[in-house]
Image: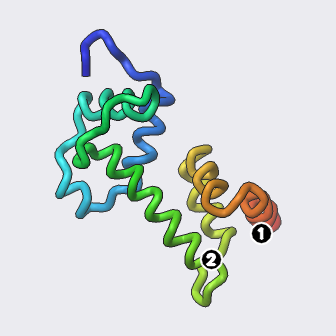
Amino acid sequence: MKATVRLRQRHLAEQDYWLSYLDEHDRAALPSLTDEHRYAFFVFDSRGGALLPQDNPILFGKVRHGQTGVVLRDSYGLPGWIGGVYLYHAYAMKGQLGLRSLAEWFGAEAVVRWAEAARLM
């Protein structure tokens, strides 16, 4: 990262959230995260910068986030569905970004229903 540029804590937290979607195999296959990766992703994601190399760990994590959403959304209502309350608990542990992801994938109304059900449990 350029010495004069420091990312805000909220930007780092969002990047760490995307990184949370990487599994052990992904982490082994990708280069180790550097400040340059963080800054390049920030420019790409926030300012519409040039495309990033596909091996940027943060970009790869964001792609995995989307893939996770597709899998969960496609399994919604099928036999063996984990249940919205359990998803709500798991993603609430990830903070507001986790709840935002659930709202993107299932709609805000579903997340509110699951939150109410979780409170009643």
Determine contact: label 1, label 2, CB under 8 Å. Answer: no
Query: On the image, numbered disc 1 is attached to which residue?
Result: 121
Task: Specify whether 39 is left or right of 95.
Answer: left
Q: Relative to 59, does residue 120 appear above or below in the rendering?
A: below
Number of dots carrying numbers? 2
Classify residue 47 by image quadrant.
top left
Mark 2: secondary structure: loop
Q: Quadrant of the C terminus?
A: bottom right
Mark 1: secondary structure: loop
Disc 1 crowd rating (10 Å Cα; few below 14, some 14-19, many 20+) is: few
CA–CA distance between discs 1 and 2?
A: 21 Å
Q: Relative to 106, does residue 16 appear above or below in the rendering?
A: above
Query: Residue 19: x and y, percent?
Result: 37, 48
Query: On the image, numbered disc 2 is attached to which residue?
Result: 76
Residue depicted at 61% across the width and 60% down the height:
105
Query: Residue 82: x and y, percent?
Result: 59, 78
Query: Residue 44: x and y, percent?
Result: 37, 32
Task: Specify whether 117 is left or right of 2.
Answer: right
Residue depicted at 79% across the width and 63% down the height:
113
Task: Specify whether 6 is left or right of 11.
Answer: left
Q: Amino acid at mark 1?
A: Met
> Which residue occupies the foreground of this view, 50 or 102?
50
Q: Amino acid at mark 2?
A: Tyr
Q: Relative to 44, does residue 63 appear above or below in the rendering?
A: below
Which of the two discs, 1 and 2, labels the residue nearer the N terminus?
Answer: 2
Residue depicted at 34% across the width and 45% down the height:
59
